[in-house]
């Protein structure tokens, strides 16, 4: 059935859309009437069957696609529109080196290695240092007497510090890593004046920095995670260039996502004061998961069908792309009671903000949850009276549900 409520030309990956709002009414309409809907796109890249994509909006269908990598390939698993508009053949080959884009068995091999860096023990080992960082970040912000931007003053730094701690980037190199990471993201938004070329150059800088780090640890092993990941390639560890691309992935996957979860979380608290009071009083352990459901920083990723298959009663042809709309799944009333309410005690909370399960499920989830917990505990302790000064300014992006500025005040 064709859903008449969606105007012709409507595209869920149009950056101008997320610039203004998450299309929750349109998602709700599709979930009810046409949960797997073909969205045509006028542009295409030669040789790819990508004149559009299937928008997958129900929780159950997003999970189904995510957990069946044999039916839905992850190659070019990222924002649908970016590849249509910008990407060259060389750039496509490079994408093959990135974990998010790999399929089994290659993905299984690399994921088994890199997840050694994300064991519960290695994340717990970071907790005290990250708590001290969170308290220092909030401590500096609380001295501000004028209104300030929560994104730059609070939300930005902890995610980058966490990645730097995890892979052991020395303190003196962090500023340049932070600078490169920030330049790589958000080039859909003209306000940042980050051209594709600057983004690509920054990515190359990060890869080369990480490759040097890996080569150094091979020459001179240390008791750290880089050494564990790259120590002996022949024993099933990473090559230096695989390590380089992995760090690049972390700088994208772990940076803007967590920054936006924190910023959306703060905005949600400031616009739901009863939830902020509840958090300050009781600090429910369920808070971070609800913030990620509510924020859904990654609006969508995509897959490509490897064979003809059926999804939610619709035939998907081999080569068709499907867009997994996590923001829609996270508001599916078949799964969430009262999905439009921000409820930090929600439990269970089977949201898909970290992906729909399956092999690519977010590797950094425990780290992200830890960071969100630490920063809100620090804010509740040191700036309990924070107030909103202005409406948030949203990021222009094809796939990130982002806030680029949030003016707040402690006064
Ligand atoms: C994958 C979301 C934080 C590292 C993913 C995926 C999503 C996601 C939606 C894709 C899942 C799929 O395709 O099925 C988020 C959100 C975060 C967050 C919302 C913060 C609130 C982090 C952090 C790190 C990280 C802090 C690491 C420092 C990764 C990696 C992958 C991934 C490496 C790829 C896994 C693979 O392909 O096997 N994340 N993420 N993420 N994330 Fe996260």
Image: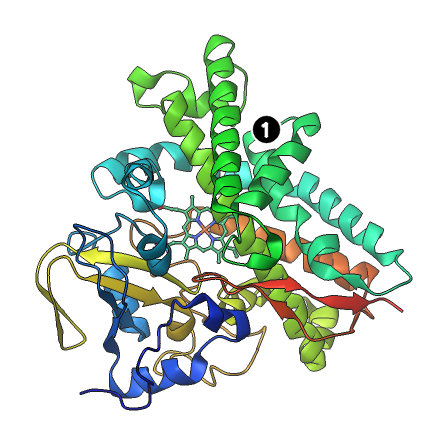
Left or right side of 146 for 156: left
Residue 150 shows up from this direction? yes
For the residue carrying disc 1, how many other residues have a C-alpha within 10 Å: few (<14), some (14-19), or many (20+)? some
Left or right side of 59 for 38: left
Q: Quadrant of residue 146?
A: bottom right
The number of callouts visible is: 1
Residue 136 in the image: state x and y as whole percent.
79, 46
Q: Is residue 148 above or below residue 12?
A: above
The C terminus sits in image quarter = bottom right
Q: Quadrant of residue 330?
A: bottom left
Left or right side of 66 for 132: right
Q: In this view, which residue lies farthest toward the top?
A: 219
Residue 174 in the image: state x and y as whole percent.
66, 33
Residue at 59% x, 51% y is 193
Q: Is residue 132 above or below residue 26?
A: above
Residue 288 in the image: state x and y as whole percent.
57, 62
Which residue is denoted by mark 1 in the rendering?
Answer: 168
Residue 356 in the image: state x and y as whole percent.
34, 61
| In-front residue for pair 287/188 | 188
Indicate the colouring scheme: rainbow
Q: Secondary structure at mark 1?
A: loop
Left or right side of 168 for 231: left
Q: In this view, which residue lies farthest toward the bottom?
A: 4
| In-front residue for pair 94/189 | 189
Q: Is residue 327 above or below residue 174?
A: below
Residue 284 shows up from this direction? no
| In-front residue for pair 83/252 | 83
Q: Quadrant of residue 130?
A: top right
The N terminus sits in image quarter = bottom left
Residue at 35% x, 60% y is 81
Residue at 11% x, 59% y is 318
């Amino acid at each position: 059935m064709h859903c008449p409520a969606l105007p012709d030309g409507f595209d869920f990956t149009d950056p101008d859309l997320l610039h203004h709002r998450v299309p929750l009414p349109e998602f709700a309409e599709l979930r009810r009437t046409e949960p797997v809907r073909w969205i045509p796109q006028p542009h295409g890249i030669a040789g790819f069957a990508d004149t559009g994509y299937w928008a997958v909006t129900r929780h159950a269908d997003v999970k189904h696609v995510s957990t069946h990598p044999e039916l839905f390939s992850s190659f070019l698993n990222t924002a649908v529109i970016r590849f249509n508009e910008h990407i060259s053949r060389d750039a496509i080959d490079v994408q093959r080196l990135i974990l998010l884009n790999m399929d089994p068995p290659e993905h299984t091999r690399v994921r088994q290695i890199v997840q050694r860096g994300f064991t519960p023990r290695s994340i717990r080992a970071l907790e005290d240092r990250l708590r001290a960082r969170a308290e220092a970040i909030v401590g500096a912000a609380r001295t501000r007497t004028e209104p300030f931007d929560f994104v730059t003053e609070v939300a930005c730094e902890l995610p980058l510090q966490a990645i730097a701690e995890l892979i052991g980037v020395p303190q003196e190199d962090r500023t340049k890593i932070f600078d490169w990471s920030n330049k790589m993201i958000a080039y859909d938004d003209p306000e940042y004046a980050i051209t594709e070329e600057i983004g690509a150059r920054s990515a190359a800088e990060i890869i080369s920095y990480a490759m040097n780090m890996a080569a150094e640890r091979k020459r001179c092993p240390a008791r750290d995670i880089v050494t564990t990941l790259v120590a002996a390639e022949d024993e099933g560890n990473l090559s230096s260039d695989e390590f380089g691309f992995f760090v690049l992935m972390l700088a994208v996957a772990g940076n803007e996502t967590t920054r936006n979860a924190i910023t959306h979380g703060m905005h949600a608290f400031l616009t739901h004061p009863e939830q902020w009071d509840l958090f300050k009083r009781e600090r429910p352990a369920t808070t971070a998961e609800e913030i990620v459901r509510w924020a859904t920083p990654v609006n969508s990723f995509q897959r490509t069908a490897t064979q003809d298959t059926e999804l939610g009663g619709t035939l998907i042809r081999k080569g068709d792309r499907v867009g997994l709309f996590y923001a829609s799944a996270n508001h599916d009333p078949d799964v969430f009671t009262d999905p439009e309410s921000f409820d930090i005690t929600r439990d269970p909370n089977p949201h898909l903000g970290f992906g729909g399960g399956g092999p690519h499920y977010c590797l950094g989830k425990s780290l992200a949850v830890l960071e969100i917990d630490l920063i809100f505990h620090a804010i509740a302790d040191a700036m309990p009276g924070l107030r909103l000064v202005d409406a948030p300014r949203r990021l222009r992006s094809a796939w990130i549900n982002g806030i680029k500025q949030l003016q707040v005040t402690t006064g």
